Image (cartoon, rainbow, N blue to C red):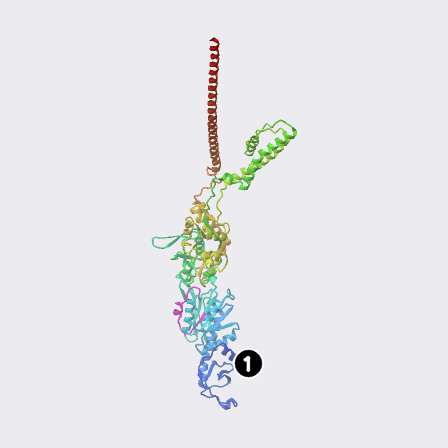
Amino acid sequence: MLPTVIFIWVTSCFVFPFRGETIAVTNNSSSSGGVTDLDPSSSLTRDRPADSDSGVGLLVHSGATYLKTGLTSSVASRLTMEEREARLLDELLGFLMSTSTGRQLYLLHDHSSSVVSSAMVTSYQRWGQLIIVRYTSELEEMEATVRSHLDVLTLRDVFVVCSAAHTIHVFTEVRRRSLESAFVRWFVVLQEDVTQEILSTLREGTQVSAAVRGSEGLYHLLSSHVDNNNRVTLEDVGWWAWSPSDDHESFLSEPLHGELSLAYSDFGGRRLKAAVVDNEAFFEVTTTADGSIQPLSGIDFQVLNTLSQKLNFTYQLVLAEDRQWGGVQKNGSVTGMIGLVARHQANLAINEITITTGREEVVDFTAPYFLESTTLISRAPEKKNQSFAVFSPFTLRVWLLVAAATLAMGPVLRVVAWLRQHYILEARPQHSLQDFAFNMFRSLVVQGNLLLACHWEQRIVFFTWYFFCFTVYAMYAGTLTAFLAIPAYEKPIDSLWDLLNAVKHKNYKPVVVLGTSNEFIFKEAKRGIYRDLWQVFDHSEGYVDTYNDGMDKVLKGKYVFLNAQLGAEIRAVTRGRHKYYFARNAFYPQGYGIACTSGSPLRRVFDKILTQMSAAGLVQKWTRDEIMKAAKRDNDIATGPGAITLRHLQAAFFLLVLGYLLGGLALLLERIRHRRHATTLGHVGQTTIEMMKEKSKNREHMGKLSESEKYGDMNIEIN
């Protein structure tokens, strides 16, 4: 007996703070067998009433423990009443715990009376795995228990045995701190009916059963339900009665806490509120004249419709005022669709919502039903200047080597001919250096060679030259055809590192939708490429309100939009796919889920249906439908490789015109040279003529003198 008493005392000291009534106990020396009477003025704090079977009472006095075997008749009568209440409470807790299916049991108490303290000890002895938690106004221990991540999928049942005021405070704090959970069930013992006050604090997700005291020994059993107006009610499901002679009786029309999967298998036509934003391809909506939001189409529209049909509920769409997806901000506020759900202004949110750690702090997400990655969308790169496309097949180095080889062939053949003439003593070669060089060029451009190779050394040189020309021509023609058929573009942005380089050196600006996960992954990054990009992010121009705004902004300048792959592809098709460029390297794989209020049982029910839809391929089918619908609106005309245009042959015509100009220039130079030569010849000729005339005159003069002399001689002779 003594070890049992010591155990009870230790338990009461460390588990239950002493809160009892101060009583004075006397004992006759004759009956005590020499034990001295207790001082009536001594303060005795009773933690547990005497056990009805053993007649042992546990008393504490100045740190010492006494075994009391006899009490005065008045105190004994009083303890008998308290024992009756203690046993009543003990039997009631035993009944409630027997209906529990939770694997972890917690008993929250406040020692509002000595009866409660006694019942705690008895319950602890009966239920060995019971965890006892003392009530405090802060409820830190209780909150830690509810939020514990240990055995998160294990049902936890909390039995609340507190005063009416403390019980109301408990559920007020559950609401304020969003402690609702599908894995926590509350069993409440009420000595007075405060169910209406408790109901005013309850939200869906708080599962409550209450035992409300009626007449003596009778408790009404209530269980929480959610009606078609989304209000939590407490419905009468039975009663429990106890008397010392007949033990206890009970009646339950249904379990105090039914299986949620069964309770939520049919919503009975409930009308849920679903938060959305207008989002093409996933949930496109329109606003009617009366201000209501009506769905049009989209993948998530099909998902929500299927859920409503399977679970028998209707829904009302609620549009986020800021038109954002939303999340937790630095100041603690929650924006967008996530904010509506976190504040219980909507039961769920569905619309291409990425599951993130930050959002999971304020809402519960279903398992992801759609997976994709994020990509970079930029304006289609400009085509490279093809004015000199005819030179594109070869690099500058190759062109220089081909030109050098062509120019070298004339002198090589001329040297071969000279060596043959010099050493074989043949006649002078019939072809000049110019003939050899020009005909080698003709061979290069596939115009044939007009020279005849009469000797083997020339034939060997011609053979190697012809093979060289054939190889160069074949590679040039093939490469030029491919180059003209597949236009060359400026280097696009294909990765986050390309984007960072473009931001730093080409004045590009990344763009994200405000309040989306694409913003948060960069904002919350502590290191790496995400952090580097956020440091160069332009807050004045980098934000847009919707995905459509982001796609439109890309076409207006040097902007790169960060968006999920599927939605961006569909939006690009409707605007002209050829106007956009999608990066080859995707990043940030993400899953889309349905956001439910914290602790809501909807999540587990939705998970089951979503898994079935994904396994059946319905989500993929709806995705293909949206892509095909967008493809019908695509105005791009697929023509394949385009015809060769003047732009491709600009260089050829440029060379032709350049040849004309050079030919004309050569003609002009020849003309100038000829005129200069003619002028020089004219001067020389004139001088020659004058000299000839002078000589002629001199000759005539000399002739006249000769005739005079002749005639003079004749005259002399005559005379």
- In the displayed structure, 29 sits above or below 421; it is below
In the displayed structure, would residue 37 be above or below residue 718? below
The residue pinned by badge 1 equals 3
Q: Position of residue 267 (x, y in %)?
A: 43, 59
Residue in the foreground of this view, choosing between 399 and 602: 399
Query: Does residue 264 show up?
Result: no
Looking at the rendering, in which quadrant would you find the N terminus? bottom right
Query: What amino acid is labelled 1 in the image?
Result: Pro
Is residue 642 or residue 117 the one in the foreground?
642
Residue 151 visible here:
yes
- Read off the magenta span: 187-206
Query: Residue 195 in magenta?
Result: yes
In the rendered image, residue 442, in percent from the top left (x then y), is placed at 55, 32
Query: Hey, which residue is sitting farthest right in the picture?
Result: 424
Q: Quadrant of residue 276?
A: bottom left
Query: Residue 492 appears at what percent x and percent y?
Result: 48, 48
Please give left or right for residue 419 compared with residue 121 in the image.
right
